[in-house]
Amino acid sequence: MAHPLQLGFQDAASPVMEELLHFHDHALMVVFLISTLVLYIILAMISTKLTNKFILDSQEIEIIWTVLPAVILILIALPSLRILYLMDEINDPHLTIKAVGHQWYWSYEYTDYEDLGFDTYMIPTQDLAPGQFRLLEADHRMVVPVESPLRVLVTAEDVLHSWAVPRLGVKMDAVPGRLNQTAFIMFRPGIFYGQCSEICGANHSFMPIVVEAVPLEHFETWSSLMLEGA
Amino acid sequence: MSLQKPMMRGLLAKRLRFHLPIAFGLSFLAAIAFKYTVTEPRKQAYADFYKQYDAVKEFNAMREAGVFESVRPSGE
């Protein structure tokens, strides 16, 4: 989860998010390059009385300030498109989970083998145990196996929602009547928090997503127990 | 005795010839500084982290701390 006063992204827990982090660093480097240039030019312009009121045109400078931005844009576009296509690769997922957005909770369905489904509501602030995170904890977590390619099909029952987990580099709109697909793989076991990312009414800020990544054998035990309890 | 005629033309061009290379130089310097103080250390930090990373050990530590919902600590 995010820390107070945090400026950057949360640590990546999936390969796609790592790539996104590095791309952001690259794009920010270009931003600093352009900003420094423009800031210096502004300072130089406001600190002189010299002006030339009679310039009509200049082919040389027009060529420079057309070609240079085009080159910079290409330098940004190439890694961007690489990651875009990387994110679209769905490499034979081991498990498919449906995440359905409702007002104002998520429900998850694991229907690959048996019919397992459950709703997950935010834990209200007054019911939090010590050490739990305000507005982020949910009564049931989406448990998944670690180091397995996963597919999540996202949809909604009523209005637009969005299923997002920053550490995994995942955000997918939940649109009623439509199934959106996203995929990810987690390097690390742990707990990953997210929040609904599309305005959906009064309790839009109070329908968090919690993904719990555990080794496969524990995931199988958990899903068996959930089926018995259903 | 006559004074030398002062330079009356090309003052702005001279200023531009002086300042523009500095502007471009500084901006490239800023980009290179960002690359080697942020971008490369971050890549290295991730590489170093995963070189020594033991997922099983981390999982067991988290499990014993009781943070998981699906797996209780081994004593329970």
Image (spheres, rainbow, N blue to C red):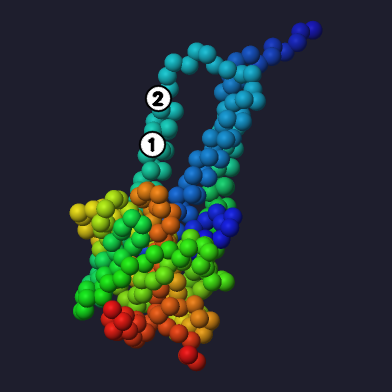
Type of amino acid under label 2: Gln
* Residue found at the very far right of the displayed protein: B1
Task: Tell me the mark number nearer the camera, choosing from 1 and 2.
Answer: 1
Instruction: Using the rendered view, name the quadrant where residue B15 is placed.
Output: top right
Identify the residue under disc 1. Answer: A67
Q: Nearer the viewer, residue A163 or A121?
A: A121
Label 1 lies in what chain? A
Q: Earlier in the sequence, mark 1 or mark 2?
A: 2
- Give the SS element for disc 2: helix
Q: Neighbour class for label 1 at 10 Å: few (<14), some, many (≥20)? A: few
Q: Neighbour class for label 2 at 10 Å: few (<14), some, many (≥20)? A: few
Instruction: Using the rendered view, name the quadrant where residue A40 is placed.
Output: top right
- Give the SS element for disc 1: helix
| Residue drawn at point x = 41 percent, y = 53 percent | A203
Q: Quadrant of the C terminus of chain A?
A: bottom left
Type of amino acid under label 1: Val
Query: Residue B10, how many percent across, how many down?
Result: 58, 19
Identify the residue under disc 2. Answer: A59
Does A101 sit above or below residue A15? above
Query: Residue A134, how many percent across, how many down?
Result: 52, 62
